[in-house]
Amino acid sequence: MVSQASRGTADKTGGEQGPRPTGGGPRFVRPVTTGSLIGWTALSAVIPGAAHLRAGKRKTGFVLLAVFGAALAGLVVFGLQLTQNAGVVVRNSTLNAIMVGAAVCALAWFALILFSFMALRPSRLPRGGQVVAGIMVGVLCIAVMAPFGFTASTVKTANDLLDAVTAPDVGSSGVTASPVRAEDPWNGRKRVNFLLLGGDAAGNRIGVRTDSMTVASVDIASGNTVLISLPRNLQYVRFPPSSPLHKQFPNGFDAEGQGLLNSVWYYADNNPQIMGGKNRGAQALRDAIGYTLGLHIDYYAIVDMFGFAALIDAVGGLKIRVERDIKWGGHYGTAGTIKAGYRQLDGEQVLWYGRSRVDSDDYSRMARQRCVIGAMAQQITPATFLANFTKIAAAARHMFRTDIPRDLLEHLVPLGLKVKAAKITSLQFVPPLIYTGDPDWKKIRTLTTQAIKDSMADTETVAADATSGATPDPTKTKDKPKAHSTPTSNKDAAKSLDDLCGF
């Protein structure tokens, strides 16, 4: 018979002690208390197998540790691959794999917590301890599943957003998409030119007017970029012979009696019989601007101005050096004033900093818009983007569209990182450099060519003065009416954004 002394006795918490070893008999693990059972189960969420080792199930514990170590090593390898090619993360296949992986991990960790809890034999706790431990472990199960659920939800949002805004309907724009080849995604080009547009479709307007038009010409090897701004009131732009509008306006765009550049998109969208189809505004504007600059416009992206404010708010605002007080709202700036100084501006303030013409003009506004683009390039880091991704996605879905193919995004991400660390210079065609009412098209092309050439120079400061030998002699161009003065200095054809914006 087993003596009374050899039997288990109740411990102070009510748990039953196991048989004490005698002689060379087997050793048994002491039962855990309510608190330690919860603690060991929680530890298993961080170090799988810990609870099984504590319960004496060493083989299972070591297997769980080995599987966890292998999974962790695989995750590290995957992370290192992403650092080598960050663009891979935006692939549809990668995002789908992350979603599936997150779902599998959520279920695996739920099962891990449950089995770790059961391995510690909670049935040997007093009834009150079992209830407390069960509740705490249930909360722990939800807690370990939540990050994986959030990851899957965020990745799905990203995937849906990229599908929604990239190359929406190539056929309707009249553009034939070229396949993106992994070995040469840029099809042999050394530069790629993006047309960045700010569309104003406010309630008091019919259709879209592109009031902000900037071409970002990017050197693929170095990331050096020239931001070329075109004024909304540039008149009588020409179209290439391949454009349907070339025959309609052989002497330059003069629709509505003025022929402002910001009306090209609107005119093309509202005259599908001329364009040969609906929704050809983007293509018409690409043709006009590309022909004007002597560049091939590869892709465009358009942002709704008012949705843009929501995007800036989503990333926490921008720090911008405001040279002088900027009034905004109506014709007299009655809505508010953005005070001069180096300030953190919210979305509405950034919007009106770039849009306001109160006590100013289009050309000053263009300079401020380039500063906004430059500030975004410098201040929106990957960490900021990820931390505010849900808000950014909600804003972008309703304000952004582009013809950039989805398959090109993985190559565009590393190019964007190059641009962030490279030299960004700026060029704008405003008086007295260019008279917008009667532009010198040859001079515009020459200045564009020179600005791109200078952006590749080794010097930090780009010197491309309008009267230097690099540009045509003003006395040899046709006479222009004297341009009015503008608050923005325009004596330099191209200059660094650091100088222009005080970065």
Image (cartoon, rainbow, N blue to C red):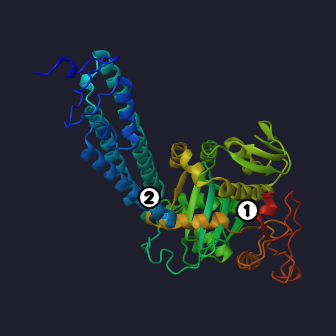
Q: Disc 2 or 1, which lies upstream in sequence?
A: 2
At mark 2, the secondary structure is helix
Q: Quadrant of residue 130?
A: top left
On-image quarter of the N terminus: top left
Give the image quarter of residue 415: bottom right
User: What residue does disc 1 label?
Assistant: 231
Note whether 464 is above or below 309 in the view shown: below
Where does the image place residue 272, in percent across and percent down from the top left?
A: 50, 62
Disc 2 or disc 1, which is closer to the eye? 2
Q: Residue at x 84, y 59 (%)?
A: 488
Type of the residue with mark 2: Val
Residue 115, disc: none
Dot 1: element:
loop
Residue 407 visible in the shown view: yes
Q: Are marks 2 and 1 in contact (CB under 8 Å)?
A: no
The image quarter in which residue 251 lies: bottom right
- In this view, the residue in front, 469 or 457, is 457
Q: CA distance from mark 2 to mark 1?
A: 49 Å
Q: Position of residue 335 (x, y in %)?
A: 77, 36
Residue 485 in the image: above or below residue 423: above
Mark 1 residue crowding within 10 angstroms, few (<14) / some (14–19) / many (20+): many
Residue type of the residue flagged with mark 1: Pro
Q: Can you say which quadrant of the picture contains the C terminus?
A: bottom right
Mark 2 crowd level (few <14, some 14–19, many ≥20, 10 Å Cα): few
| Residue occupying image coordinates x 38% and y 59% | 74
Question: Residue 466: where, in percent of width, then height?
Answer: 84, 75
On screen, residue 321 versus residue 11, left or right, reads right
Q: Residue at x 67, y 63 (%)?
A: 214
Q: Residue furthest left?
A: 1
Tell me the residue that label 2 is attached to. Answer: 76
